[in-house]
Image: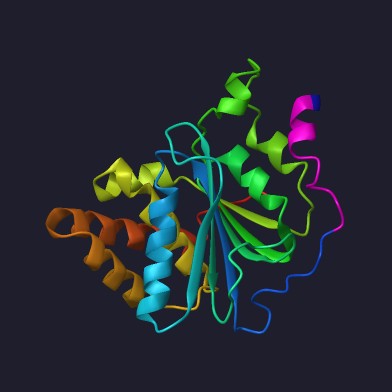
Amino acid sequence: MRWLRGLCRTLRLPLQGNRGGADGMITNIIIAGVGGQGVVTAGLLLSEAATIRGMHVVMSEIHGLAQRGGSVSVDVRIGEVYGSIIGRGDADLIIGFEPIETMRAIARAGNKTQVIMNSEKITPVSLSMHDKEYPSNADLTSMVDKSIKIREINAVSLAKKAGSYKSVNTVIIGAAIGLGILPFEKDDMLSALKNRFSGKLYDINREALGYGMDEILSNQSVSLS
């Protein structure tokens, strides 16, 4: 596991306190995954919901290329902020679409950061190039500072239940709303979904949003730390 400890070597460093959402004025969200999972779309939906709420939003894609199989990370900053990058220790919420990519993002977590992690494993390019076996979630989370609470959600099964695998990102957004730390309501996200989808696609994503919220609110998600 030496290669993995090198990849995640910052995860046990002393955490800085969150400077983002502590005063309720700024919310910093990191979304991490691989190309093809809808990471950028999730960022756009979160940004639009906050805008509908009348809030200032800055969004940036800061890692990798949005191509299938490549690492993708998006920063969404909501509130009176102007810089686009979330610094180490400043993330209020990390939304991980894939376990290893979640670990990369956790390197920027603070002692109040909350994490939602999709359980679906997609072997990243960096792993396949070195012909390494994908580690278990237990191996991954064992390297994370214990003050960080990670909630695992099977977003794929819930998306399929809603009617489409492609609604995985909406399921995870629903879970994030269910945590109660985002500065907007479910209705704001429904409006954002309605602006992007119509007809059956809207119905699927509306269902997916509800399933994600219910998964968190019913405490069926698994806390790994």
Q: Residue furthest top?
A: 131
User: Quarter holding the N terminus?
Assistant: top right
Q: In this view, does 71 lie to the left or right of 213?
A: right
Magenta residues, as a range?
3-14
Percent of width and height locating residue 202: 20, 59
Q: Residue at position x 66%, y 28% from top? A: 135
202 part of magenta stretch: no
Of 65 and 68, nearer the camera is 65
Of 19 and 141, nearer the camera is 19
Percent of width and height locating residue 163: 24, 46
Q: Can residue 110 be seen in this view?
A: yes
- According to the image, what is the colour scheme of the structure? rainbow
Q: Disc count in the image?
A: 0
Percent of width and height locating residue 61: 52, 53
Of 77 and 170, nearer the camera is 77
Q: Residue furthest left?
A: 199
Q: Is residue 175 left or right of residue 99?
A: left
Q: In this view, does 9 lie above or below 220?
A: above
Q: In this view, does 120 lie above or below 150?
A: above
Q: Residue at position x 51%, y 34% from top? A: 70
Q: Can residue 225 be seen in this view?
A: no
Q: In this view, does 113 lie above or below 146?
A: below
Q: Which residue lies furthest to the front in this view?
A: 82
Q: Residue at position x 49%, y 78% from top? A: 183
To which quarter of the image does residue 104 belong? top right
Percent of width and height locating residue 95: 54, 55
Q: Residue at position x 37%, y 70% from top? A: 48
